[in-house]
Image (spheres, rainbow, N blue to C red):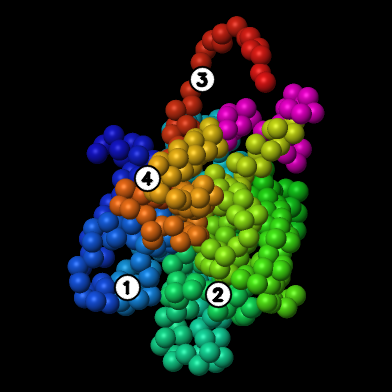
Amino acid sequence: MRRLLRKPVRLVPLGFLAVILIGTGLLMLPWATSQQRWTPFLTALFTSTSAVSVTGLAITDTPNYWNDFGLVMITVLTQLGGLGILTGAALVILAVSRQLGLRNRLLVQAETAEFGLGDVRRLLLRIAVTVFVTEALMTALISGRFWLVYDYPPGRALWSAVFHSVQAFNNGGFTLYTDGLVAFSRDPWVALPLSFGAIIGGLGFPALFEAVREWRQPRRWAVATKLTVWGSVALTAFGLGYLLVSEWRNPYTLGTFDAPGKVLAAFTQIALSRTGGFDVIHVGRLTEESYPMLIGLMFVGGGSASTAGGIKVSTFFLLGFAIWAELRGEPDTTVGRRRVSPASQRQALTVALLSVALVAGGTVVLIAMTDEVRYYAALFEVTSAFSTTGLTVGLAQRLPAPGVYLLTALMYVGRIGPLTLGSAIALNTRRRLYRYPEEQPIVG
């Protein structure tokens, strides 16, 4: 225990595992289901892992299988998973700062532009206030809409708004409706609050706090903030244009909407596809050319130290800048007149390649476990689980037990993997007093 406390990063996977197992036990109880029956272990484990990892994948019909107690448990687990990863990320960064000495401590503080050695209490308070104020605003808007326009009873309107606000901000994908949020795809008073809630939760608090504080002078943002904010804008704009083009005439998705409805539904789906996992249009009925784009967006995910999964926006665009610098023959990789350290580039490359290996390996194994499954469907489901997005083409509910266990493991690894790996790399950084002779092997 003392060794674990010396490096709190090692407590992150154990903490998540403990919460998942507790949630599994509670969801197995008879009074968590509508039929008042014991839930099978695998079903409870998958649901608990999906909630704690803020994924939203389900192998049951969520609104009909679980009763109020079960749905409340899913909400609590999602909130713990989202808020816990944020506070865990902050504590890990602070733990790294203490371990690396003054020079690296100042570098970490400069890169994050927010986390100082004496700011733990203030930081965690700001995170908590941001989370609950944002969720409260979303709840107020959506519950009022449900009550005044959709004639929901006040209690049902409030509960539905709370449930979906928590899911959206924490980038979960559970919903109280069998068809997802398809019924509200053209309602801006429901779609937009959920979209912006997911975007805020998916930015990450280091980037969010600095962007708000220095909103008048974006040039002063740290490199990580620039990559996250402008990268998120670029990915959302690209996804929106792509989806509109590919689905404009599809009668099963956007084809029957008018032009404003198409734009609203497409924007909401893209905003929630990158991290959130809600179905605003029928994902299983998309044209095949739409799936590569969604798979790519899910794989990239959201911002660092956020509720989102994936390899992270900053990792993706940092690799893009590195490739561009190499193609131009530049000796350094620069972003916004700042030179990116080789160590950061190696870390980004490590996270990206390991993630590609996990997704590719998981896809191959999933195809081997099942019969007559299209490659893109298996890749879509594996990417959704690893990136903790939660979108599905309906494959998860038809998988045999080994396939369900595989997706469960991918959700867990996808949630704690990048954080643990990045922190472990930082903690293991050491300075050698010697260097070997340099050689340039043939590449390509």
Please tell me whether mark 3 sits on a helix, a strand or a loop. Answer: loop
Residue 97 got which mark?
none
Q: Are marks 2 and 4 in contact (CB under 8 Å)?
A: no
Q: Which callout, 2 or 4, points at the residue further toward the start of the chain?
A: 2
Q: Residues within 10 Å of mark 1 (few under 14, many from 20)?
A: some
Q: Which residue is mark 2?
A: 182
Q: Which residue is mark 3?
A: 431
Q: Which residue is mark 1?
A: 65
Can you say which quadrant of the picture contains the C terminus?
Answer: top right
Name the residue at 42% across, 80% down.
159
Q: Which callout, 3 or 2, points at the residue further toward the start of the chain?
A: 2
Quarter-wise, where is residue 270 in the image? bottom right
Q: Which callout, 3 or 4, points at the residue further toward the start of the chain?
A: 4
Can you say which quadrant of the picture contains the N terminus?
Answer: top left
Q: Amino acid at mark 3?
A: Arg
Q: Position of residue 378 (x, y in %)?
A: 48, 49
Question: Residue at the right extreme?
Answer: 328
Q: Is residue 168 left or right of residue 286?
A: left
Q: Which residue is mark 4?
A: 369
Q: CA distance from mark 4 to mark 1?
A: 26 Å
Q: CA distance from mark 1 to mark 2?
A: 20 Å
Closer to us: 184 or 430: 184
